[in-house]
Image (spheres, rainbow, N blue to C red):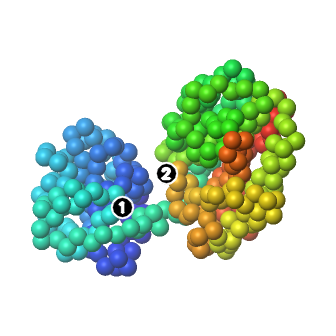
Amino acid sequence: MKDRIKRLRDRFQDFEIDSLLVFSQVNIRYLSGFTGSSGILLISPQRCFLVTDFRYKQQGSLQALDCEIIIAQDGLIRALGKLPIDSFGKRMGFESEYTSFKQYTELKESLPSVSLIPVQNLVEDLSVIKEDGEIRCIKRAAEISDRVFEEAVAFIKPGVTERDVAAEIDYAIRRAGGEKASFDTIVASGPRSSMPHATTSDRVIQEGDLVVLDFGARYEGYASDLSRTLVVGTPTERQGQLYKIVQKAQETAIQEAREGITCSQLDGVARRIIEDAGHGADFGHPLGHGVGLNVHDPPRVSWRDGVVLKAGMVITIEPGIYIPDWGGIRIEDVIVIREDGCENLTTAKKGLTPGAL
């Protein structure tokens, strides 16, 4: 944690700030190790304060070893105003993306002699390249997802509901050693599979349905993200053809993923294959996104994003085709960018027919 805070302080000059207030719970965890739900982190050139409430007094002391723990008696922001002013400097940055107007107003009232400077992505830019320990956690989370996928395949059959399948997946994640699901598990069947982020419903799965599964596990706070598409029964010719297009797009993008390629270039690799097959309009979302403590971390692997991929970045590759009133197909793996290619952390089998897996 000390190295992360040092690298953060080294960037203060770039943002013309003397100190930083961190409101994002994910960023607080990244910088201090604290996992509680109530806290503000104040990092100055020499000191680090974690302001929390009585519920997290012991937890803060055990987790945020490099921070001075301040227990607020009358609100977290008011507690900041009681700290020694020389700890802040004159220009205090704050994470504007995670700060409400109410909090901003309270900051101005509690710290009248400090200039508040809005900053964005300061912490996120530091965390985009993952440390070896972080990659090990993501890999373990991916292994849990792979194992759970096998159990989900065995559970899916005509007569069960999407919600039944999602509940089985969520329970299996914990049985396999995961802390919890990375996000709300998506199970979308039949025509509903054409909605990329469908909300799992009580729809009964039927023979011939496409079923899109999109879920992940958390391990030591780090997320995995896995999508697979199955058919209940025997795939139709059209289902098989479209699946092959999506699989080719994904496999080709994974082959091209490496340090030095931009997000837009990598997105284009997969998108051209789908466009050439006549389904460009049916693939409307980016190819992927970063993964870390957030299931959606930077970078955004999109046709609009010129970020250059670097070794140590962890991203998803998840092309899809979505046709309203028919269904959808998506395949998603998590990969680590390396200097000479990439490492695929996802090993869950691919294919449309559960019985063949």
**Is 63 on the left or on the right of 75, as rendered?**
right
Residue at image point 62% right, 57% down: 285
Residue at image point 21% right, 40% down: 54
In the picture, the quarter occupied by the C terminus is: top right
Q: Mark 2 or mark 1, which is nearer the start of the sequence?
A: 1
Q: Is residue 232 above or below residue 66?
A: above
**Is 231 on the left or on the right of 45, as rendered?**
right
Percent position (x, y) of residue 82? 11, 58
Q: Is residue 48 above or below residue 13?
A: above
Residue at image point 49% right, 52% down: 294
In the picture, the quarter occupied by the N terminus is: bottom left
Query: How many marks are shown on the rendered structure?
Result: 2
Percent position (x, y) of residue 245? 81, 53
* Residue under numbered circle 2: 293
In this rendered view, identify the residue nearer to me: 202 or 249. 202
Place residue 202 in its image quadrant: top right
Residue at image point 82% right, 59% down: 277
Query: Could you tell me if residue 214 is visible in this image?
Result: yes
* Residue under numbered circle 1: 97
Query: What secondary structure is marked by label 2?
Result: loop
